[in-house]
Amino acid sequence: MHTLPIQIPLWTDVQGRTESLVNVAQVPQRSPFRYPGGKTWLVPYIRAWLKSSSTPKVFVEPFVGGGIISLTVAFEELAEHVVMAELDKHVSALWKTILSVDSEWLIERILSFEMTAEAVQEELMRTPECEREIGFQTLLRNRTCHGGIMAPGSGVMKHGENGRGIASRWYPKTLATRIRRIAEIRSRITFLNTDGLALMQERASERDTAFFLDPPYTAGKNGKRAGRRLYACNELDHEALFEIAKSLTGRFLMTYDVADEIVEMANRSGFDVSTVSMKNTHHAQMHELLISQNFSWKK
Ligand SMILES: C[S@@+](CC[C@H](N)C(=O)[O-])C[C@H]1O[C@@H](n2cnc3c(N)ncnc32)[C@H](O)[C@@H]1O
């Protein structure tokens, strides 16, 4: 039997106010990344979900990407500790640098970089000698490529966005502040360059652990194309993801593109499926799936 997801019609925030779409401008921007598929719009939902029962000891995000959700949980102390994982070596190098003593080196490098198209090209052609250099290159690539897309085939902006050229998304002072703030709370965060599925399996028996699962959307024919375009690491065994999610003792929340294959897998696993509306970066209204177990969005 194919159960259709329920639409979360109006969001009631913790103060009891209702709104139909999340206003992303009100969510603190904490990540230095511009991440394709970034989940800033989901922040109010994550807050409500985590506050709906006792504070988890550990919050695990196995597919962390730009990390806005993990950062929010760490800054707002919505869990005692945050564990984030990412398979992509370049993305990982940036996280490791930010969360290590090299964060000050990185900040200095950002503030002293003279942003021109030539300087970007020269820096990105250079063979990095250590992890922090890979980290800097990753940030530079992320902030100068169209839509923050770093997957093979993506290109550096020529005309930039809002007519500001290659520097249109390079805000050195803002990036420095964000990185410094994250570094200040680094004791609350553990970063792992590992396979998210393996991490979930390792922690499956932990009762006080909450998992936020935002895998690359590569299920189905359309999903495969979208996922390949956005991420270098885009191969994922979605059946295995659902099997492992089923085995989790702690609670989880998963987001996905609206796709029949996913709704079917979720129904088969006995999970709750809702759809939620949000606005994408082009202000178009989009829908995504929220999949969870033993949690209702209805108040
Ligand atoms: C949809 S994005 C996450 C976006 C993130 N929630 C954000 O707000 O920025 C999925 C991420 O999973 C990563 N990834 C893909 N396969 C993975 C795996 N097996 N283990 C860990 N990370 C993986 C991709 O590199 C990508 O960064």
Image (cartoon, rainbow, N blue to C red):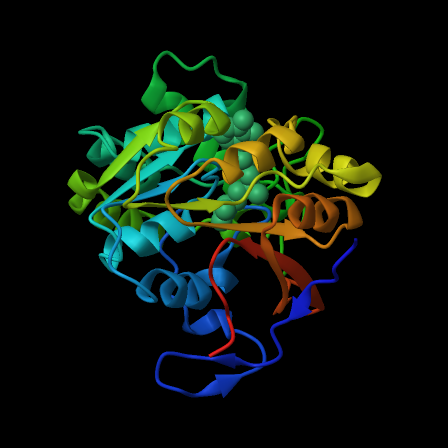
Position above or below: 180 against 22: above
Residue at 24% x, 57% y: name it: 55
When asked about the image quadrant of residue 95, the answer is: top left
Q: Where is residue 154 in the image (x, y as percent from the top left)?
A: 68, 34
Is residue 147 in sight in this rendering?
yes
Name the side, left or right, on which 101 lies relative to 264.
Answer: left
Position above or below: 120 against 7: above
Position above or below: 285 against 244: below
Name the side, left or right, on which 78 lies relative to 292.
Answer: left
Which of the pair 98/19 is nearer the observer?
Answer: 19
User: Which residue sits furthest right?
Assistant: 221
Which of the pair 280/205 is nearer the observer?
Answer: 205
Residue at 72% x, 36% y: name it: 229
Name the side, left or right, on which 259 lies relative to 91.
Answer: right
Q: Where is residue 36 in the image (x, y as percent from the top left)?
A: 59, 46
Q: Where is residue 22 in the image (x, y as percent from the top left)?
A: 52, 73
Residue at 35% x, 85% y: name it: 15
Which of the pair 20/26 is nearer the observer?
Answer: 20
Residue at 50% x, 53% y: name it: 293
Name the side, left or right, on which 230 lies relative to 89.
Answer: right
Q: Where is residue 250 in the image (x, y as percent from the top left)?
A: 37, 45
When asked about the image quadrant of residue 60, the answer is: top left
Is residue 135 in sight in this rendering?
no
User: Which residue sits furthest front?
Assistant: 1
Which of the pair 234/135 is nearer the observer?
Answer: 234
Q: Give the tally of numbered discs.
A: 0
